Image (tube, rainbow, N blue to C red):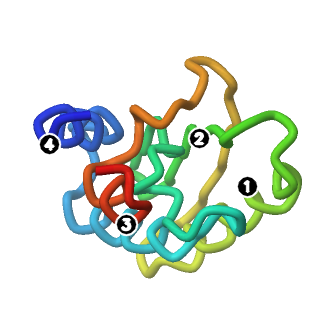
Amino acid sequence: MSEEASQQSAEGASSSSEPEGLQAKVIEALQTCYDPEIPVDIYELGLIYEIDVTPADEVYIKMTLTSPMCPVAESLPPEVESKIRSVPGVRAASVEVVWEPTWSMEKMSEAAKLQLGLL
C-alpha cells in the first residue's frame, strides 16, 4: 500500500464529527495493543476499520482480526475496549469485530511493512 493509501486508510478510520484531540488519544491507545503473533500494533496492522467518537465522547471501534481462527479472537477485542475506556475523556466504548472486508497485508501501513521487512 502506498503512503497515500495508508493516509487515506487512516483518514477513513475516523469520523469528521469527533473532537480531534480525543481521536488522537484513542489512536495512541490502539497503538498499545498488539497481535501477539505479529510484533506490530493493531492500528498499524490495519485491523482498525473505523473509529467513531460521538459528540458525547462515546467511542465506537469497528475492527477485524488477521483471521477468524486468530488465537486472540476472544481476548483482543475486550482488551481494545478496556484500553479505549481508560483514555481520559472517553465516557463509553464499544468494539465490534467484523469480517468484511477481509483483512489482508495490503491494509498494513508502510511503517508496519517496513518493521516486518516486507519493503
Residue 64's image quarter? top right
Residue 96's image quarter? top right
Q: Secondary structure at mark 2?
A: strand
Q: Residue at x 60, y 68 (%)?
A: 34
- Write down the residue under mark 3: 115
Which of 24 and 44 lies nearest the eye of the viewer? 44
* Type of the residue with mark 3: Gln
Q: Nearer the viewer, mark 3 or mark 2?
A: 3
Which quarter shows the N terminus?
Answer: top left
Label 3 to label 1: alpha-carbon separation: 24 Å
* Type of the residue with mark 1: Pro
- Write down the residue under mark 1: 77
Q: Secondary structure at mark 3?
A: helix
Which of 91 and 24 lies nearest the eye of the viewer? 24
- Write down the residue under mark 4: 3
Which of 36 and 56 lies nearest the eye of the viewer? 36
Q: Residue at x 69, y 24 (%)?
A: 99
Circles 2 and 1: CB atoms closer than 8 Å: yes
Residue reaching furthest to the left: 4
Per the rendering, the mark at residue 63 is 2
Label 4 to label 3: alpha-carbon separation: 15 Å
Q: Secondary structure at mark 1?
A: helix
* Type of the residue with mark 4: Glu
